[in-house]
Every structure is written in C-alpha cells, then in structure tokens.
C-alpha cells in the first residue's frame, strides 16, 4: 500500500511546476539587484527534498542530461529563462510517464 502511494500525481506535478516558476520569477527579480544567484541553492534543495519524499531521485546520473541542459540554459540566458521550471516539469512528467507506461520513459536507460 505504501509503495502504491510513491510517485507523483497530476496535482503534485502542477504544484511543483508553479513553485519552480515562482523561484524562476523571483530569481529574475533579484537578478536586477545582483543577488539572483542566492535563489538557486534554495530552489534545488526544495526540489531535492520534495522529489525524494515521493521516491524520485532528483540528482542522479539518469537525470544528468536534463539537469545539464537546465544549467546551460541558466548560464546562457543569465537566469532569465525559466530553466528550473523546465527541469522540474521534465522530471515530473517523466516519472509520471514511467508510472503509466513503464517501458516508455524518456530517461529510461
């Protein structure tokens, strides 16, 4: 029964995406003051813990391409693109896809 509750449902993915978008907007606003970089560790810690509570490893070698693309997007656009939102949404939807159709996960290697 406890194993059945592991994973993400649609409401959790939506809430995670909204929180990630909030962090991205907050980072853009604080970037004008030169302290936007302070949001990144707080945001990543939030999602590391949140995903771990649902049995999903946020930082892993399987997720390296997604996290790497998000980091590259962050650096190239100076924090203006919502890269954290992209990363959280991609990982959340991938975990949902793996739950619905185990053989069809995007990052299923």
Image (cartoon, rainbow, N blue to C red):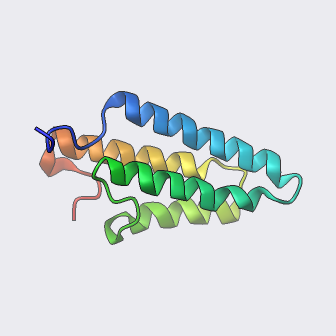
Do we see residue 78 in this rendering?
Answer: no
Q: Position of residue 78 (x, y in %)?
A: 74, 60
Which residue is drawn at the image coordinates 30% and 39% (left, top)?
8
Q: Residue 10: where, in percent of width, then height?
A: 34, 29
60, 77: nearer the viewer: 60
Q: Nearer the viewer, residue 90 or 23?
A: 23
Name the residue at the left extreme.
1
Image position of 4 with respect to 37: above or below: above
Looking at the rendered image, the quarter that the C terminus falls into is bottom left
Which residue is painted at 37% across and 63% down in the image? 63
Q: Position of residue 2 (x, y in %)?
A: 15, 41
Residue at position x 59%, y 66% in the image: 72
Residue 55 appearing in the image: yes
Relative side of 91 to 18, left or right:
left
Image quadrant where residue 37 sits: bottom right
- Residue 29 place in picture, x, y as percent: 80, 45
Up-down relation of residue 55 to residue 11 (above or below): below
Residue at the bottom extreme of this rendering: 61
């Amino acid at each position: 029964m406890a194993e059945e509750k592991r994973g993400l449902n649609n409401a959790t993915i939506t809430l995670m995406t909204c929180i990630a978008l909030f962090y991205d907007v907050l980072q853009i606003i604080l970037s004008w003051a030169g302290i936007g970089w302070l949001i990144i560790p707080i945001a990543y810690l939030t999602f590391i813990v949140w995903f771990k509570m649902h049995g999903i490893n946020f930082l892993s070698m399987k997720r390296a391409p997604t996290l790497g693309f998000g980091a590259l997007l962050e650096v190239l656009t100076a924090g203006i693109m919502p890269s954290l939102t992209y990363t959280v949404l991609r990982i959340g939807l991938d975990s949902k896809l793996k739950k619905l159709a185990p053989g069809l996960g995007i990052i299923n290697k």
